[in-house]
Amino acid sequence: MSALPRFSMSVDDGHPLDLRMADLLQSHGIKATFYLPMMNQEGTPVLSSASMRELAQAFEVGSHTRSHRFLNTLHGSEAWREIVDGKQQLQDQLGEEVAGFCYPGGRYQYLHKLQVRSAGFRYARTTQNLRIDLEFPLFEMPTTAQFYPHTRSVFLRNFISQRHWGKRSAALGASLAAEDWLIRLHALLDLAIAQGGVFHLWCHSIDIEKLQLWDQLDAFLSRVARQIGTEQRVYNRDLIAASAAVSTADGSQQSAVKEINVNAFQAGEFKREESDAN
């Protein structure tokens, strides 16, 4: 008998429309993890301190750096400050620990995984798509799909660039079967349910507003609520525990990210690149 499927959702960038997203999610009994920067260097508004605290009362909240800067464009010391200050300032606002981190734009290097761990985070999420399995490293949590009208060519291009092809090939086949992007998302959900996997959906609230996709998202979440039980709708942090259980059960080990000296970060000494940028 296959395992029960899981559903997890991420909402990135901390736009004020995240409060509307929160209302929609709660109407369907869907858990989600919101990744919040303290400001957005692109000029997009972010949630107020009071709104951040309101959100954290009902959902998991993670960090998205201090000012939403792509880490792979920064010197090592700048990236370190973005990661550390983003965590500390968010914790100061919420009055509680923040365990999860999301790489802005999905862009990072090997150094940044080390920094995120040494900053005290317990896991980090990427933008790698087409994953419905639970076998992933703590600081490279993948996703299944973004709620966005991507073309099939985007799925194919991302498949080629984002590695782990063996674990993503079945989802690629499902995503290429139809021209309509919503049909592709439903096909990916069908696959996750059939295989007892995890469907990890992510989005930006501002994209949903700009493209007027609220009704479509409402309908998709309604289907999730009908087909995936309440206990199987989980936060991103819950996927870490599930992933660890899978690793223990099959005797495999997740790749470790070693600790390194903070001074090495500030000197920018680590140069090995490893990115999930899309």
Image: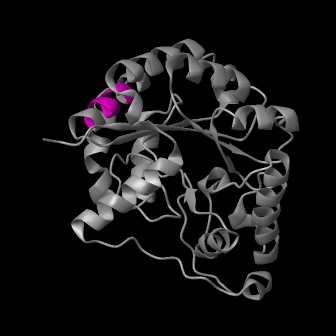
From the viewer's side, name the closer residue of 180 and 275.
Answer: 275
**At x 36% / y 38%, what residue is drawn?**
6
Position above or below: 234 against 111: above
Q: In the rendered view of the protein, which quadrant contains the N terminus?
A: top left
Residue 230 placement (x, y as % from top left)? 41, 28
**At x 17% / y 42%, what residue is drawn?**
2
Residue 244 placement (x, y as % from top left)? 38, 62
Position above or below: 137 against 104: below
Any magenta on residue 128? no
From the viewer's side, name the closer residue of 161 and 7.
Answer: 7
| Residue 108 visible, this orientation | yes
Colour scheme in use: one colour
**In the displayed structure, does residue 231 sit left or right of residue 210?**
left
**In the displayed structure, does residue 223 sit left or right of residue 28?**
left
Position above or below: 143 against 266: above
Q: Quadrant of residue 199?
A: top left
The residue lying furthest to the left in this view is 1
| Residue 67 visible, this orientation | no
Magenta span: chief secondary structure: helix
User: Which range is magenta?
Assistant: 185-191
Residue 216 placement (x, y as % from top left)? 51, 16
Position above or below: 264 against 8: below
Residue 111 placement (x, y as % from top left)? 63, 76
**At x 36% / y 42%, what residue is drawn?**
198
**At x 62% / y 64%, what residue is drawn?**
108
